[in-house]
Image (spheres, helix red, strand yellow):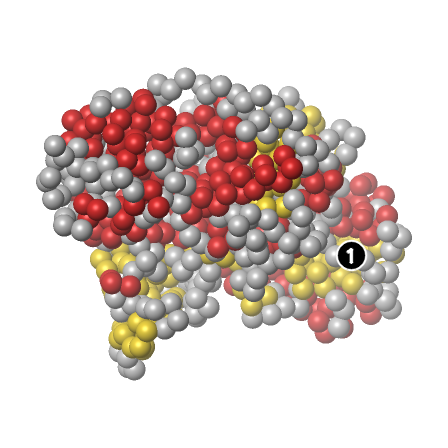
Amino acid sequence: MANMTPNKCPMPVQDPDVRNKNFEEVALGYTFEMAQGEAERCLNCKNSPCVSGCPVGVRIPEFIALIKQGDIEGAYAKIKETNALPAVCGRVCPQESQCESKCVRGIKGEPVGIGRLERFAADYCFGKGEAPAKAAPNGKKVAVVGAGPAGLTCAGSLAKLGYSVTVFEASHVAGGVLVYGIPQFRLPKEIVKAEIDALEAAGVEIKLNAVVGRAVTIDELLGGEYDAVFVGTGAGLPKFMGIEGEALNGVYSANEYLTRINLMKAYKEEYDTPIKRGGGSVAVVGGGNVAMDAARCAVRMGSEHVYIIYRRSEAEMPARVEEVHHAKEEGVEFKLLTNPVRVLDDGNGCVSGIECVEMELGEPDESGRRSPVEKKGSNFVIPVSAVIMALGTTPNPLIRSTTEGLETNRRGCIIVNEETMESSKPNVYAGGDAVTGAATVILAMGAGKKAAAAIHAKLTATL
Amino acid sequence: MHRIIKKQRLNANTVLMEVEAPLVAAKVKAGQFIMLRIDEYGERIPLTVADHNAEKQSITIIFQEVGATTKRLGEMNEGDALRDVVGPLGRPSELEGIKKAAVIGGGLGCAIAYPQAKALHEAGAKVDIIAGFRSVDIIILEDEMRAVCDNLYITTDDGSNGNKGFVTDELKKHIEEGAGYDAVIAIGPLPMMKFVSKLTREYGIKTIVSMNTVMIDGTGMCGGCRVTVGGEVKFACVDGPDFDGHLVDFDEAMRRNGFYKAEEKAAMEAHECRLGMGGK
């Protein structure tokens, strides 16, 4: 008999007043008993609607059934069949709008905690798994550009099929947004590293500090030893508002602030990279997950007040409900229906405050969200010593400006055939944020997987 | 790992290093830079490539020991290795079509001006190099610069080399005498580039400057390197580092380079303190 409790088993978390002073993981994960209890809530529906909500098609009811039976290794192996990075996805996927949104239990109560169970299985098996057997080489070579979620997934899928895969990564660490963007307290870097180590054990070669477009071009890769190239270079170029005072000292892009903290570990004493810490207040402009990450980092860096400034209301916020909830618990203050008009100078070229204007919601715009309209004369100043712009990012121009014949749209995103992820340039595939603009880890992974299948189909057709 | 194969002190606080970096050495062009990280704990710093040797798969970097990282770098020796070197980054300098150029280097800027002069010289352009230093005892790269130009003029602020003045004085003199430069390339401290650009604007001579800014990744991600050029925000790492000197907002750039001044000062003090206690 299924467990008919209407609510998910709550996730144990660090106390907000403790965790807002450290970078340890916020959510602590289910125990074996909690996981089994939650697994019992799954009705094992015949048509498994949850699977249709997963961009990589994880066999959800099957892995949950294995958890019920106590076969956690089996559950983990089941997830791994279709998902290269379970410990990552269990933590950062927006399950509420994907698999869990399709769960039948969600009709009368809360859906099954699929993400939490995925994380449990991955964490339970952390470090226990044996190295996967390397597939027999098929003699074909594929180059992957960018070691983020899209590239790693594509590389892992191809390696399983016997391809010799080399990933070219511009940074000194593999992982892309998983290491420079998402903070330690949401996704411990040890976990990302373990997932990447597993890919390397499966035969994927990762070349760090290798900038495609500069050190080597796509044409050189194709003209040389590689039969196909997958471009998963993400959307790394930060946007700014174009308002007065944005060049003042103390104004960061969220990318800069998060990279200093997450990639360069500026929050740790023994690391050299500088960051402003302590004293003063911080304003984060934007309402997405990146804005929440930046604000929650700013709290942990000892800021007096940390504000989220967002021009619409909470209902329109693109951030996950869970992230907004955690940010509030940790003391982040929300200034909604508020839009910055300029950043103020303290007289020495540093930020002394941010002047904002109040907004009200008007008619829905093309995105379906009610567009904010300025309330004339409602200007007010919030005193802050730093401003972090979290307004979204666009694809890096490096690849498109150095690759002849690679078509991009007016936002700089690579244009692909949506069935195969092949670009306008033969044998060059692309996926993830480089194609869609800033989106989610799991969508990028889905694209990497789809491209791997298409590359396999094309290259085996010519074997 | 990138082994240091040669270390040479050019003056009291300027060091030249030749470092193994095959990917960079194979492709680098004048004007491009690298990011390096000494070890796991180090920050990523940008340095312009001063020279390269494709056969030895090595590059030459020249730096001044002004911050905690460059101090630590200066304490490293031949045989030691750097954890990370990535590049070449930035757009190569656009030097095509230049027939007669004045290449201006200010202090350490000569290390960046040198490859540009060399590229122009090798392409057959007439090249005058005007190099400015505070005093005669800190002059660097004199022989190297002399080898890649038609005329080398060295000025010193204090006149200790017998030619007192600023690079702008020397440049103005040659322009007035009818040198007929069709381009000026100025690389050095921001105030120097600002005043060279101001001077050449009066004469309508195209001027290229190289912006050495604060940055972390060097590939367009952090935006820390943003400079205002002709009223537009540009990223020095991907749009530059070369820009039209007549359009750059130098005052803003000077202010932005002081972004982490307090943190840098603290790091330097901590570094000196560790040295005082017997090294790190």
Q: Position of residue B195 (x, y in %)?
A: 65, 64
Question: Dot 1 surroundings within 10 Å: few (below 14), some, or many (20 or more)?
Answer: some
Element carrying mark 1: loop
Q: Position of residue A383 (x, y in %)?
A: 28, 63
* Quadrant into which the C terminus of chain A falls: top right
**Subunit bearing disc 1:** B
Is residue A14 toward the left or the right of residue B89 in the image? Answer: left
- Judged from this view, the residue extending furthest toward the front is A46
Residue at 85% from the left image edge and 43% from the top image edge: B147
User: Can residue A425 be seen at all in this image of the molecule?
Assistant: yes
- Judged from this view, the residue extending furthest toward the left is A5
User: Can residue B110 be seen at all in this image of the molecule?
Assistant: no
Residue designated by label 1: B95
Residue type at mark 1 is Leu
Compare residues B137 and B14 and report the one nearer the observer.
B14
Say which quarter of the image contains residue A376. bottom left
Compare residues A445 and A327 and report the one nearer the observer.
A445
